[in-house]
Image (cartoon, rainbow, N blue to C red):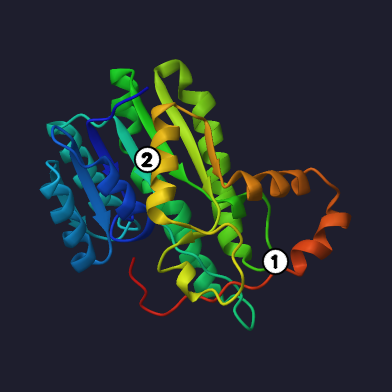
Amino acid sequence: MKHFSSIVITGASSGIGAALAEAYAAPSVKICLFGRNAKRLNAIARTCTARGALVVAHACDVREQETLRTHILAFDTQHPIDLVIANAGISAGLGNSTESEEQVREVFAINVDGVLNTVLPILPRMQQRKRGHIALMSSLAGLRGLPSCPAYSASKNAVRAFGEGLRGAYQEHGITVSVICPGYIRTPMTDTNVFPMPFIMSAQKAAQKIQRGLALSRSRIAFPLALYLPLWLLTCLSVRLTDPFFAALPRKSSLPKNEKI
């Protein structure tokens, strides 16, 4: 099993990102955290420091391409990175209406461009060292375009496909790529959902599953199995059969204004 000593995590101020930061924090581990909410991010950094980790925290937006590049490469220069978890993302749906152009573009900018801004700067250095692990946070919603949240599911589908492509392209260079596809996780983002969320789990439990999957170098870390398998099966069927089912799913809430995660 793999053990990581120099880790970058985006979206670390809440939810799965925060839980992963705390799960990996230990003596001799160096962690670079990114998040938009400075107060929550600093609180997570203090918790990780108390557990013995060396922590560097940056309150910034993953859409800030050059800022992210500068911080990631500076951290890598001091502590060669062996794991990057591109976790930052936002969740949004139709709400009671349709998605605005502003929301669609924001979802793609954070969920897709944010992943690129996190991963692309470090790939050449990992390739040169012939080692490293990249983990991309997709979603079970990324298995199929969902009418209840078109932009979100499409953005997570793009992240999944990008990760799967990277895995094949960089395998010969010693780089491992994992795509993470969680179901419903209890986070500030899902707190706005007013519909039943089957098999919902805590961020801490999700972090445990992800940590184990990364240690085993799993290509796809999808959970819970009881939700993943039916969804995967549905994607194999004709869209004429599945469209009515997906169209009947509850709608996600639209994106709150000025949300920082």
Q: Which residue is mark 1?
A: 147
| On screen, residue 114 above or below 146 | above
- Report the side of 57 relative to 228 (left or right): left
Residue 33 image offset from top left, x and y in percent: 23, 50
| On screen, residue 28 above or below 208 | above
Relative depth, front residue between 40 and 113: 40
Inspect this view and state whether residue 93 appears: yes
Badge 1: few (under 14), some or many (20 or more) residues near its Cα, within 10 Å? some
Which mark, by number, is residue 197? none
Amino acid type, label 2: Val
Q: State which mark lies toward you, 1 or 2.
A: 1
Which mark, by number, is residue 119? 2
Residue positioned most to the bottom: 96
In 3D space, how far apart are the residues under numbered discs 1 and 2 (Cα atoms)? Answer: 29 Å
Residue 2 image offset from top left, x and y in percent: 34, 24
Residue at figure coordinates x 13%, y 35% from the top left:
27
Residue 14 image offset from top left, x and y in percent: 32, 61
Residue at figure coordinates x 75%, y 47% from the top left:
235
Q: Secondary structure at mark 1?
A: loop
Quadrant in the picture for residue 173? top left
Marks 1 and 2, the one that precedes in the sequence: 2
Relative depth, front residue between 91 and 54: 54
Badge 2: few (under 14), some or many (20 or more) residues near its Cα, within 10 Å? many
Residue 53 image offset from top left, x and y in percent: 14, 41
Quadrant in the picture for residue 73? top left
> Which quadrant holds the C terminus?
bottom left
Residue at figure coordinates x 26%, y 50% from the top left:
68
Inspect this view and state whether residue 88 appears: no
Amino acid type, label 1: Pro
Relative depth, front residue between 228 and 177: 228
